[in-house]
Image (cartoon, rainbow, N blue to C red):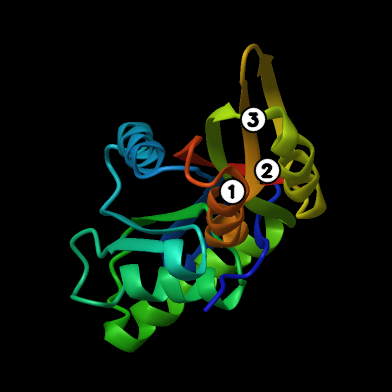
C-alpha cells in the first residue's frame, strides 16, 4: 500500500491566545522535521513560560507508513490534553508540525470534557491561523558503479517520477546522488537492480521534506 505523494504542513509559526473561564490557553504552532527538533521546541517553550500551570503538546511527523505521532498531557488528567491536541492536528490534516498549548489556571475547574474541548479548540484555531503548504517526502539515494549504457535510463526514470539529480561523478563508471519521492523507493530499487544486473550499488539515505 502506497503512502500519499505529498502532505500538508503549517505555512508559518504562530502564537494564539484563548481565554476560557479565567484560564489562559496559549497555542504555539511550529513546523518541524524531526523528533529532536520537536523536543528542542518543547524545552524552549517551557523555558519561555516557566510559571505556566501546564505545558501540553502533540506532534506528528511524516505520513502513511512513515508517520510518527507523540503527545503529552503535561500534568493534566490522562488523555485530557495531549490526545485532543493530536486530534486537532489530524482534523486539520497537517503533519511535520508540533502544537504546544500552555495553560495558566484561572481558578475555575473545567472538568475533563471541558479540558478536552479547550485544548482541542485552542490547538485547532492556532493551526488554522498558521496556514498550510504542501510538502513532499524525498528519499536520498546514492548510486555507485553505474555503467554508461544504463545511465540515461536511470536518470530519466528518476526525473519521470518528480525526482531530482543532485550530483553526478563521471569516471570509469558513474556515481549519482539523487532525491526521489519516498513512495517510489521500492519501484526504483527493482528498476535499478534490473538495469545494472546487480553490479552497481544503491544506498538509501535520509528523508528530506521538500516544499511543492
Farthest top residue in view: 171
Q: Nearer the viewer, mark 2 or mark 3?
A: 3
Viewer-side label of 1, 3:
3
Which of discs 2 and 1 lies nearer the camera? The answer is 1
Residue 210: give its label: 2
Residue 48 lies left or right of residue 142; in this view the side is: left
Q: Earlier in the sequence, mark 1 or mark 3?
A: 3
Mark 1 → mark 3, Cα distance in angstroms: 11 Å
State the mark number for residue 192.
Answer: 1
Disc 2 packing (10 Å; few <14; some 14–19; many ≥20): few
Q: Residue at x 67, y 64 (%)?
A: 5
The dot on residue 1 is none
Q: Residues within 10 Å of mark 1 (few under 14, many from 20)?
A: many
Please give the name of the residue rendered at 37% of the width and 83% of the height, measured from the top-left corner.
114
Choose top left, top right, bottom left or bottom right for residue 9. bottom right
- Identity of the residue drawn at 55% across and 38% down: 140
The percent position of residue 118, horizontal first and vertical second, equals 44, 74
* Spatial separation of the CA atoms under disc 2 and disc 1: 24 Å
Residue count near mark 3 (Cα–Cα under 10 Å), binned few <14, some 14–19, many ≥20: some
- Residue under numbered circle 3: 147
Q: Percent from the top left, x then y, of residue 176?
A: 63, 27
Sequence-wise first label, 2 or 1: 1
- Relative to residue 211, is residue 187 drawn left or right? left
Amino acid at each position: 500500500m502506497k503512502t500519499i505523494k505529498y502532505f500538508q504542513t503549517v505555512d508559518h509559526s504562530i502564537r494564539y491566545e484563548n481565554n476560557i473561564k479565567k484560564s489562559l490557553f496559549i497555542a504555539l504552532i511550529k513546523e518541524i522535521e524531526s523528533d529532536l527538533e520537536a523536543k528542542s521546541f518543547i524545552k524552549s517553550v517551557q523555558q519561555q513560560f516557566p510559571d505556566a500551570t501546564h505545558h501540553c503538546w502533540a506532534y506528528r511527523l511524516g505520513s502513511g507508513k512513515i508517520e510518527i505521532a507523540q503527545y503529552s498531557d503535561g500534568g493534566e488528567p490522562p488523555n485530557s490534553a495531549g490526545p485532543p491536541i493530536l486530534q486537532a492536528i489530524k482534523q486539520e490534516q497537517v503533519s511535520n508540525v508540533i502544537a504546544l498549548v500552555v495553560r495558566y489556571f484561572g481558578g475555575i475547574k473545567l472538568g475533563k470534557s471541558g479540558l478536552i474541548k479547550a485544548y482541542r479548540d485552542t490547538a485547532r484555531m492556532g493551526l488554522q491561523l498558521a496556514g498550510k503548504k504542501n510538502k513532499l517526502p524525498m528519499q536520498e539515494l546514492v548510486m555507485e558503479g553505474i555503467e554508461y549504457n544504463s545511465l540515461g535510463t536511470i536518470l530519466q526514470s528518476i526525473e519521470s517520477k518528480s525526482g531530482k539529480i543532485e550530483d553526478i561523478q563521471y569516471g570509469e563508471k558513474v556515481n549519482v546522488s539523487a532525491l526521489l519521492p519516498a513512495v517510489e523507493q521500492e519501484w526504483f530499487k527493482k528498476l535499478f537492480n534490473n538495469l545494472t544486473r546487480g553490479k552497481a550499488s544503491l544506498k538509501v539515505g535520509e528523508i528530506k521534506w521538500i516544499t511543492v
